[in-house]
Image (cartoon, rainbow, N blue to C red):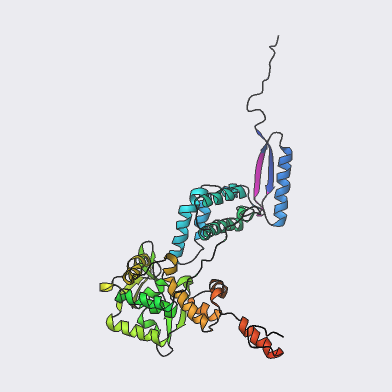
Amino acid sequence: MTDDVTKVKTSLYGQGLRYKVRYLDPSGVEKSKSFPDRQKKRADAFLIEVESTKLEGKYVDPKAGNRKFRTQAENWIKAQSPDAASREAVQSRLDSRINPHFGEMPLGKIKPATIREWLGKLDEERLSENYKTVLFTTVSSVLDSAVEDKLIIDNPCKAKTIKRPVSVSPDIVVWPDDRVMEVEGSIDPRFAIVVPLGAGCGLRQGEILGVSPDDIDEEGMVLRVQRQLRVVRGTLVFAPPKGGKRRVVPLASGVLAAIKEHTKLFAPVTVTLPWKDPGGEPVTVRLLATGEKGRLYTGDLFHKVVWMGAFREAGLKYRGRADGMHALRHFFASVLLAQGVSIKELAEYLGHSDPGFTLRTYTHMVPSSHERARLAINGVFGGSQDHGLEAA
């Protein structure tokens, strides 16, 4: 006599991987993916999708999306700016604002909802629109690289439901002439030359601190902007101007006279620093503006001690961004535009690679052409040269 046997379904019933889909990837390597019991339709759909993406050239290995965002970002950053300080700035943004949210996420798990959640957190932190734009662009660029590497199919930052931050151009306040003169007269005399170099040549702070009298071509009356002084990993280095773009700017006789007078009072100091990176080739330069005993200042220290010190000495209220050293470049741009210098020429003098950026930045300073247009049309139709209309 045989005992009756009753089969009881356990919690594992139906949980096994019953269906295995085998296929060849575009390189001819066999791949497979398994599906649980009762999911044959899903397995069939997966195979159809694989074959379709292969035909369209959009195939992505399902396992490729397991790569962590942090790992992809480390690979992506290698192809960014060759300038070490710029890469350092990007890495800082990744470490402080991006990797804490995305770093350990598999790329394939980052969906539009993930991006929306992160953007919401940035809003809660009340970050500026410009900073949010920079952060968003960085994340999107990393994910673009993942698409190019065929790790994911689409960049979730480009989904229709994502409202990307939009940068806002700050209002530019142009200094009047007397403010330029007051600051020049109140700054530490060893650094008074920075004002003519900024307001008269349009140089950036780091470029000013990196100027050598050997960069001056008196015969051609030009200044060759060859380098800047900047900090990389806590070390002062010489580096090419922003964007790696050396340039030539016209040298006014008044600025040249100021430089000559400065060198009589304070002899140029010979300084040797590594080029571009703390481990770079040593470069020796005679610098025009240094502190006592040849002391060098980082940009941040110069701003806090020397530049803001001039405002305190002059009794001027420091208005934040409007009174940063960039105000000297804005002054330079306003003077040139008022004298009819073209946007293209100004872009070259300022070291902007895109004249469109120069136009967007200074469009409100470009003299109006309305009156010239009126005069031109009146020359044809014989209208009055007055602005108003005469009564009949």
Residue at 71% from the left image edge and 41% from the top image edge = 43
Q: Which residues are magenta?
A: 24-34
Q: Is residue 146 in view?
A: yes
Residue, far left: 293
Where does the N terminus fall, quadrant-wise? top right
Q: Is residue 353 above or below residue 146?
A: below
Whether 325 is drawn above or below 373: the answer is above
Relative image position of residue 263 (x, y in whole percent): 31, 82
Between 197 and 390, the one lying in front of the other is: 390
- In this rendering, is residue 233 above or below 110? below
Residue at the limit of the structure toward the front, as seen here: 392
Residue 325 horizontal/vertical position (percent): 41, 71
Q: Is residue 197 above or below residue 33?
A: below
Q: Is residue 308 magenta?
A: no
The answer to which image quadrant residue 18 occupies is top right
User: Could you say where residue 189 lies in the image, as x and y percent from the top left?
Assistant: 30, 76
The picture places residue 107, in percent across and down from the top left corner, at 57, 50
Residue positioned 48% across, 80% down in the render: 335
- Foreground pick, 334 / 266: 334
Quadrant occupied by the C terminus: bottom right
- Of all residues, the one furthest to the top in this rendering is 1
Please state which of residues 170 and 53 is positioned toward the viewer in this rendering: 170
Kindly indicate the quadrant of the structure image that contains residue 390.
bottom right
Q: Is residue 40 left or right of residue 299?
A: right
How many badges with numbers are in the image?
A: 0
In percent of the image, x 67 and y 83: which residue is there? 389
Q: Is residue 388 left or right of residue 101?
A: right
| Horizontal side of residue 102 vs 318, given as left or right | right
Q: Residue at x 55, y 82 (%)?
A: 342
